[in-house]
Image (tube, rainbow, N blue to C red):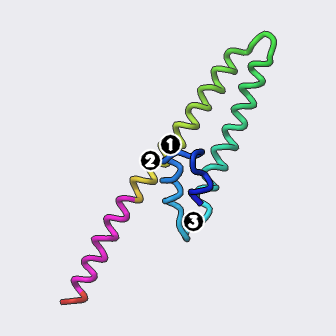
Amino acid sequence: MVWLWQGYLDEQFIQLEDLQDDANPNFVEEIVTLFYSDSARLIHGIEQALESNPLDFNRLEACMHQFKGSSSRCMRTFQQVKQEHAILRRKLETYFQLARQAGTA
């Protein structure tokens, strides 16, 4: 599916796709859906703050701050999942190596 998005998605999204597997086939869709749901609400709040007369700078600042935080949390969550994935992979590789050695003994 990566070829469909070529030129539109960066490497981080492709790495997110790599974390999806048969055990969680909707992983990417769930993460993206949560992000867009949250960001759509915040964008609407930003639009309302910009359209208010007089401008509601407090609401604008709050929405912008939340939007930035939402994007940041998404990246931190992804980085954490990626790190845990790598740790689990190393542990499983060690386990299988030991299991092979025990089988040959």
Q: Which residues are magenta?
A: 86-102
Tell me which amino acid carries mark 1. Met
Indicate the secondary structure of the residue bearing disc 3. loop
Single out the residue that lies furthest toward the left.
105
Quadrant of res 56: top right
For mark 3, does the 10 Å Cα neighbourhood hold few (<14), some (14 to 19), or many (20 or more) residues? few
Tell me which amino acid carries mark 3. Asn
20 up-or-down from 81: above or below: below
For mark 1, does the 10 Å Cα neighbourhood hold few (<14), some (14 to 19), or many (20 or more) residues? few
The quarter of the image holding the N terminus is bottom right
Label 2, on which residue? 79
Principal secondary structure, stretch drawn in magenta: helix
Q: Are marks 1 and 2 in contact (CB under 8 Å)?
A: yes
The quarter of the image holding the C terminus is bottom left
Sooner in the amino-acid sequence: mark 1 or mark 3? 3
Sooner in the amino-acid sequence: mark 2 or mark 3? 3
Q: Residue 21, image x and y in percent?
A: 53, 67
* Mark carried by residue 85: none
Q: CA distance from mark 1 to mark 3?
A: 19 Å
Q: Residue 95, image x and y in percent?
A: 30, 74
Label 3, on which residue? 24
Which residue appears at 62% of the width and 62% of the height? 26
Q: Residue 9, image x and y in percent?
A: 57, 46
Quadrant of res 92: bottom left
Q: CA distance from mark 1 to mark 2?
A: 6 Å
Tell me which amino acid carries mark 2. Gln
Q: Is residue 27 left or right of residue 51?
A: left
Label 1, on which residue? 75
**Front-most of residues 49 and 14:** 14
Q: CA distance from mark 2 to mark 3?
A: 18 Å
Q: Residue 66, image x and y in percent?
A: 61, 30
